[in-house]
Image: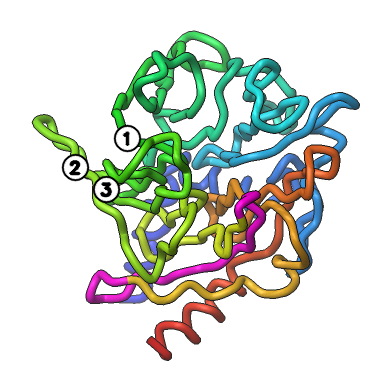
């Protein structure tokens, strides 16, 4: 029986070269743009590669599922899209090349679960609706089609993220108050069918009075990383909430003092497809804003054990 098992395993690997190559890259020195992986102390990610003297790298980043492409926004400041761009690096012929410009005036690149679609925020709007844009694998910049509207709603669509179940998550006022009043924003579930789209706040304890919109949801919906304790100026800390078997969420708890090391803006949280590292943006102003990364899988296991046991 054991011999048969190993024969079948070898055949599976031989018949799945993409899977084998993906695993090989993630575990190689070339992964993550060839950067030295961090420990449990956050460090700035690839600063000399991502930025120039007059730009900052910030907001949500995205690695392709196979780890061979990396997307990130750059700008000259916060809250102004004039110089906003999404750039990317690509891994080919055993080396990384880039950065290249994917598009302009968009941000928050987010992959679909199958890696065939990229979602963005930003772009041009009629002023009455919130938009989520998409690009498909095709012949255009970086092998993607030009951005087209994926969702258009009269409520907020911030930090849009899909999951394996087909349920999407989004920061939104969800018909509660003015779309431009960010104090009304909650983390919500967005369920879409051919006939209808419904949106519902996750409610307490994930959401609190004030702005709740910056988050990351695991593809299997097992946990949420939220920007918690938001001040009126959107300074915050990173907390985590776990999905319980009864479909409710545990009260969010801090990711700890190594990540929440003082007053700052923390957002754009994102976990790499291999589950090992947490990326996020941090700064007290555009001048000291950077993309950070930190070892996350061990911290995740520890916090999950503690919080599911206590809740």
Q: Position of residue 6 (x, y in %)?
A: 40, 66
Q: Answer with mark 1 or mark 3, whichever residue precedes in sequence.
A: 1
* Element type where label 2 sits in the image: strand
Q: Nearer the viewer, mark 3 or mark 2?
A: 2
* Element type where label 1 sits in the image: loop
Q: Which mark is residue 155?
A: 1
Q: Which residue shows up at 86% across the image and 24% down it?
A: 54
* Residue 90 appears anywhere in the view: no
Q: Which residue shows up at 63% across the image and 40% down it?
A: 59
Q: Nearer the viewer, mark 2 or mark 1?
A: 1
Q: Which residue is mark 3?
A: 167
Give the spatial CA distance, label 2 vs label 1.
11 Å
| In the image: residue 17, left or right of residue 32 | left
Indicate whether residue 197 is drawn in magenta: no
Task: Point out the image quarter for the C terminus.
Answer: bottom left
Q: Which residue is mark 2?
A: 198
Q: Answer with mark 2 or mark 1, whichever residue precedes in sequence.
A: 1
Q: Position of residue 137 (x, y in %)?
A: 43, 20
Q: Which residues are magenta?
A: 232-248
* Element type where label 3 sits in the image: loop
């Amino acid at each position: 029986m054991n011999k048969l098992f190993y024969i079948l395993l070898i055949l599976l690997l031989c018949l799945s070269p993409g899977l084998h190559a993906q695993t090989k890259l993630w575990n190689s020195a070339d992964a993550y743009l060839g950067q030295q992986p961090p420990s449990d102390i956050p460090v700035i990610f690839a600063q000399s590669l991502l930025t120039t003297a007059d730009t900052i790298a910030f907001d949500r980043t995205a690695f392709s599922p196979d780890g061979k492409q990396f997307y990130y926004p750059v700008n000259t400041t916060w809250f102004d899209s004039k110089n906003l761009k999404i750039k990317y690096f690509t891994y080919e012929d055993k080396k990384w090349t880039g950065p290249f410009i994917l598009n302009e005036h968009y941000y928050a690149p987010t992959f679909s679960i199958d890696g065939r679609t990229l979602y963005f925020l930003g772009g041009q709007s009629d002023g009455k609706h919130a938009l989520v844009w998409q690009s498909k694998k095709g012949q255009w910049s970086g092998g993607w089609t030009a951005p087209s509207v994926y969702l258009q709603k009269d409520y907020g669509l911030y930090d849009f993220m899909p999951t394996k179940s087909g349920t999407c998550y989004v920061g939104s006022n969800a018909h509660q108050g003015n779309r431009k009043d960010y104090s009304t924003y909650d983390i919500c579930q967005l369920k879409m069918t051919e006939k209808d789209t419904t949106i519902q706040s996750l409610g307490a304890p994930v959401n609190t009075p004030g702005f709740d919109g910056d988050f990351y949801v695991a593809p299997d919906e097992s946990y949420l990383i939220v920007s918690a304790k938001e001040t009126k100026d959107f300074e915050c800390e990173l907390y985590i909430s776990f999905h319980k078997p009864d479909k409710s969420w545990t009260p969010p708890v801090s990711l700890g003092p190594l990540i929440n090391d003082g007053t700052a803006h923390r957002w754009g949280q994102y976990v790499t497809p291999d589950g090992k590292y947490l990326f996020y943006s941090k700064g007290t102003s555009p001048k000291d804003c950077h993309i950070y990364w930190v070892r996350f899988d061990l911290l995740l296991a520890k916090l999950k054990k503690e919080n599911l046991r206590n809740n």
